[in-house]
Image (tube, rainbow, N blue to C red):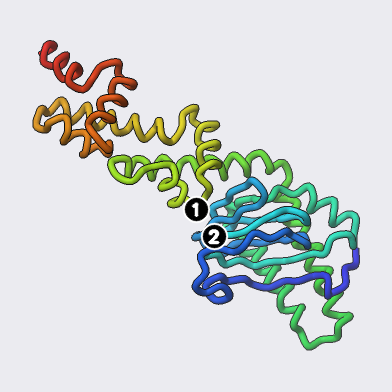
Amino acid sequence: MYLPKEDLQCGVFDSTILRRGHVKSQDRRVVYYELELFHTAGGTSYVEEGYYPTRRGMLLCAKPGQIRHSDFPVRCSFLRIKAGLDADVDRLLSAAPDCFYIEDDDKIEELMGLLAKMGSYSVSSASQELNTMRMNAGLMEILYRCMRLWQGSHETVVEQSVNQIVRDAYEYINENFSGDCALKDIANALHISPNHLHTMFRQSTGSTPYETVSQRRIEKAKKLIVTGEMTMSQIALETGFCSQSHFNKVFKEKTGQTPIAYRRSLLEEY
């Protein structure tokens, strides 16, 4: 393997410096293979249909032809490798998962150190031939370490990223179901599109975000009905329903009884 220095780009991207005042990047089609190792949590990276909440140790590998963008803030070390120059490199990177979360902090530090060395070679005052040799040697070491991490990882990575989004959605619902908790509100809070949130949530849980919000509201309504201290209209507003009629409709759909009938049944049991 021997890649010319000009076909290897490396450095550090920090959106708070290079994209100050921006909340996201524009969609773009990837040209090079793009390896990115994220330093901190904060934003979200989108590659094709994948949505990956960024955190320290997230390793992204975008391929030529893919569409991607990021929600800021993000800070990462990056390495861009021109496609078509080495068949083995193309084969390895084409088969790599779009995203992998490194859990071992020592491995994160080692990979960050290797990427930093690559960056120093790219600006070194040494001869171009020497720097190109150093960068190729560094690239081989980085790809070897990435290959060891990636082996058998694709299904696990996708499951982790989806499960994290669903867990975050559940947390948002549990904290906000009595207020603004429409699908778009949850999606905006998680920095993903409403349609994809709906799809991932339903595939993972068997119910939609709306159904889960409604269930949380009904659970709270039942507790308030038991106390007998509030009117039905007050309970409707307290649990996030827009009106008592909407509350009555959803409550009956979920329990088979109207709120008044439910309260009556509790009194009869007593």
- Label 1 crowd (10 A; few <14 / some 14-19 / many >=20): many
Q: Which mark is residue 71?
A: 2
What is the C-alpha distance between the residues marked 1 and 2?
7 Å
Tally the numbered discs.
2
Query: Which residue corresponds to the image point at 42% horizontal and 46% vertical from the top-left?
Result: 186
Tell me the kind of residue under disc 2: Asp
Q: Secondary structure at mark 1?
A: loop
Q: Which percent across, then down, holds residue 5?
A: 84, 74
Q: What quarter of the picture does the C terminus occupy?
A: top left
Q: Which residue lies at the image location 49% right of the left edge and 72% below the top edge? A: 21
Q: Secondary structure at mark 2?
A: strand
Left or right position of 161 against 180:
right
User: Vertical placement of 175 versus 33: above or below?
Assistant: above
Residue neighbourhood size for the residue with mark 2, other residues' Cα within 10 Å, grouped as few (<14), some (14–19), many (≥20): many
Task: Give the image location of residue 99, x and y in percent.
Answer: 65, 51
Three-letter code for the amino acid on which mark 1 is drawn = His
First along the sequence among labels 1 and 2: 2
Residue 130 image point, x, y percent? 86, 80
Report if residue 156 is visible in the image: yes
Q: Is residue 36 above or below residue 198?
A: below
x 28%, y 41%: residue: 178
**Could you say which is closer to the camera, residue 24 or residue 151?**
24
User: In the image shown, does 184 or 206 lie closer to the viewer?
Assistant: 184
Which quarter of the rendered picture does the N terminus lie within? bottom right
Q: Are marks 1 and 2 in contact (CB under 8 Å)?
A: yes
Residue under pointer 1:
191
Residue 75 tag number: none
Q: Nearer the viewer, residue 2 or 253?
A: 253
Left or right of residue 48: residue 212? left
